[in-house]
Amino acid sequence: MAAEDLVTISDAKTFLKLTGSADDGKVAALITRASAWAEQITLRKLRIRAYTNLRFTGPSGVTLRIHGWPIATAQTVTVKLDEVTQTVWRTEADGDIDDKDVVVASDDAWDTRWGKANHLYRSAGWGSGLGRYWGSAPRSSDQLGQHRVLLSYTGGYDPVPEDLQQATFYLLQKLWRDQEKQQTGLTVINLPTGGSVSLPETGIPREAMDVLSLYARPVLGAV
């Protein structure tokens, strides 16, 4: 399986009503495409994976939004700012939350689709202490304070929620039909009186979009 795969080959074949192993290679490739499509639609990484030594410039304000969540609070979260290791609060077992530099936080702790453990909070903000040198230094000094956040953590779903798997199956089904029947952009509807009619479709199956919209990453303020 690829790192982003949201469903297994076995479950995908059951959904597509395929038997035997002749199509396993094609199904596996389309699972990866469907899973990547789901991540593209939601603007986030969905399947659990480890992120190591991500370096970037800290945002303004106290909230650092990430692309892969929920953050796995049972795993180590390592944060450095200006090469100084920050203490991190993940769960109640970490003691007094006010004693830590960084908190694994939630916009909505009860909504596991988008709001739980979806950002890092630092009361002192994420700006570098180096800042910008305003004297007569060389041009290269303009970059002081850039890329001073270093982050390693594990985030994403494991197990993958059932509704998210179902949405992936609908994306997979479209990709499979497009490939096997060469009917890209068409939906074939069987009429109760017999026969069928082909209608143009928008691209993303509505059944998938109804679910994936609930998992979408808010764009405003994201990094």
Image: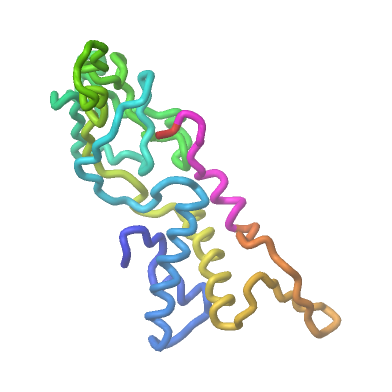
Foreground residue, 162 or 223? 223
Q: Quadrant of the C terminus?
A: top left
**Residue at 37% of width from left, 80% of height from top?**
25
**Residue at 56% of width from left, 65% of height from top?**
170
Q: Position of residue 129 (x, y in %)?
A: 22, 16
Q: Is residue 95 above or below residue 118?
A: above
Q: Quadrant of the N terminus?
A: bottom left
Determine if residue 96 is in view. Answer: no
Q: Is residue 141 above or below residue 151?
A: above
Which color scheme did the rendering employ for the protein?
Answer: rainbow
Q: Is residue 26 above or below residue 55?
A: below
Seen from this angle, which residue lies furthest right? 193
Relative to residue 35, is residue 142 drawn left or right?
left
**Residue at 38% of width from left, 41% of height from top?**
67
Q: Quadrant of residue 118?
A: top left
Relative to residue 45, is residue 86 drawn left or right?
left
**Residue at 21% of width from left, 13% of height from top?**
136
- Is 205 magenta? The answer is no
Q: Position of residue 196 (x, y in %)?
A: 78, 81
Foreground residue, 61 or 170? 61
Region rendered in magenta: 208-221
Q: Quadrant of residue 121?
A: top left
Determine if residue 205 is in view. Answer: yes
- Is 217 magenta? The answer is yes
